[in-house]
Amino acid sequence: MRSFERTRQPVPMKTAEAINQMIRDHNLKPGDQLPSQRELSVDLGVSRASLREALSMLETLGLISVQPGRGVFVAEEREAANTASAWRFDEQYSLREVFELRRSIEGSAAALAVTHMTPADIETIDTMCREIEAAAIERNVVTVAENDVRFHDFIFERCGNRLLQDIQTQVRRLLVESQQVPMAERARLVETAVEHRRLVEAFRARNPDATRSAMEQHIRGSAGRAGLFL
């Protein structure tokens, strides 16, 4: 079983947080230009590969626009009708196909995980949920996204089914991207927080059917915020 480490933070995620904080600290507005990628890489002390991954995440979340030959700019907030346009994997799978897969495997993983979670595990997901709630109120989409990924990873880690875990590992990049696309509409981040709170309460009640239902409702809600209806 993979272990969940709350203190471990991938470099691209840490870099995305730093860039997001830069935008907030300097009160940058849509259309404002960020330093060049070379400058960002040096200033943040990260490799160009990690920086590119961070910028890709921020672009999916609707915070920036990377314009080849021009630079990196703060983006206008996308509305629901335009969020699906950020999906980068159409040549492989449609965003709808990924959400349909998520509804199936994540509902099953949640129903299984509820039978394996310890009281300490419940407190772990409750902590992540509270961080999502606080960040959603502030419209801090990067912090919401970070804890959302940890929340869903943790459920797979505790589901006790190695095949489900292997499937999640193989398609994790697609799953994570599908989690982030709907968050570009920051006015609806609170909906994400509410859905995670329902999940935590279902886990706390030790009810597999309710947990499966809460996860499936969350997946449908997330798809809806991306302009898709399952």
Image: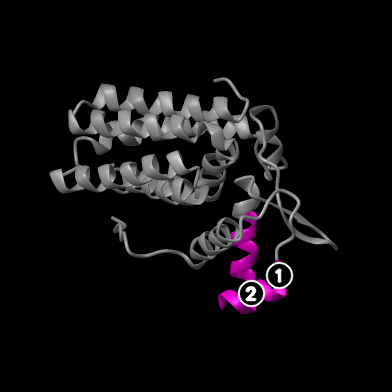
Cβ atoms at labels 1 and 2 below 8 Å apart: yes
Task: Please determine whether, in this image, residue 154 is positioned above or below residue 72.
Answer: above
- Vertical position of residue 183 compared to residue 219: above or below: below
Tell whether position 47 is magenta: yes
Q: Assign the C terminus to one quadrant of the image.
A: top right
Query: In the rendered image, which quarter contains the N terminus?
Result: bottom left
Q: Which residue corresponds to mark 1?
A: 37
Q: What residue type is labelled 1?
A: Gln
Instruction: Kindly identify which residue carries mark 2.
Output: 41
Give left or right: position of 106 versus 59: left
Going by the image, does 186 lie left or right of 90?
Answer: left
Residue at the (70%, 43%) spot, across then down: 76
Per the rendered image, the range of residues in magenta is: 35-56
Q: Position of residue 61 (x, y in %)?
A: 60, 46
Q: In this view, does 118 lie above or below 58?
A: above
Kind of residue at badge 2: Ser
